Image (cartoon, rainbow, N blue to C red):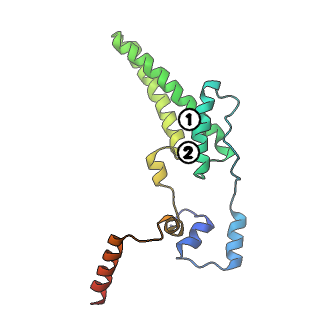
Amino acid sequence: MPGKRQPTDLVVAGGRKHLSRSEEEQRRDQEVHVPVPEQAEPPRWLPKKLHVEFAQIGEILRTAGLYSELDRDALGQYFLARERWQRADKLASAAIRAKDEAAATKWAGVQATYFRQCRQCAEVLGLSISSRCRLVVPPAMRAATSPVEEDEFTKTLRARQERAVGG
């Protein structure tokens, strides 16, 4: 069974598959490209007190290339679910301190629901470690970010490896 379709840039950078120029152009024409916005603006329905944090996290995602205008609602839902989870957490904690088992059970269930929503939004947006680890970076991009100049230790190791392979 074939794997998930990868962007053309990733296929070309991988070097395992040769595409003719016409094949490459045809693949690129079939891809969806969404322009990166100038800034991350919060949706109108999001409460004002969450706008500053939305702009901060949205800017981080935007500069990382992980945000477009299509992600605005998902990021807003993340902040809303997180705020509601925090409120439910306070109410559950208060019920536990008051030794009200019925209220604690009720608020713990509400808390779990909002936490699940928050986690799902975070994973969709790349806000969790596991979701960022699933991002595929072409080897050519990794090589471009590595330092050009080697330090003395790396040179010594490389020379030792070459001697071992050669002799």
Amino acid type of the residue tagged 1 in the rendering = Tyr
Above or below residue 100? Residue 78 is below
Residue at image coords 48%, 55%? 134
Q: Nearer the viewer, residue 150 or 125?
A: 150
Say if mark 1 contacts mark 2, CB within 8 Å. Answer: yes
Q: Nearer the viewer, residue 130 or 158?
A: 158
Query: In the figure, is residue 53 to the left or right of 22?
Result: left
Dot 1 falls on a residue whose secondary structure is helix
Amino acid type of the residue tagged 2 in the rendering = Leu
Tell me if mark 2 has few (under 14), some (14-19) or many (20+) residues whose alpha carbon lies within 10 angstroms of its own: some
Where does residue 163 sit, x and y in percent of width and height?
A: 29, 85
Query: In the figure, is residue 44 to the left or right of 77?
Result: right
The residues tagged by marks 1 and 2 sit, at their Cα atoms, a distance apart of: 9 Å
Give the residue pinned by disc 2. 125
Where does residue 146 sit, x and y in percent of width and height?
A: 47, 66
Residue at image coords 52%, 47%? 126
Where does residue 125 sit, x and y in percent of width and height?
A: 55, 45
Rendered image quadrant of residue 111: top left
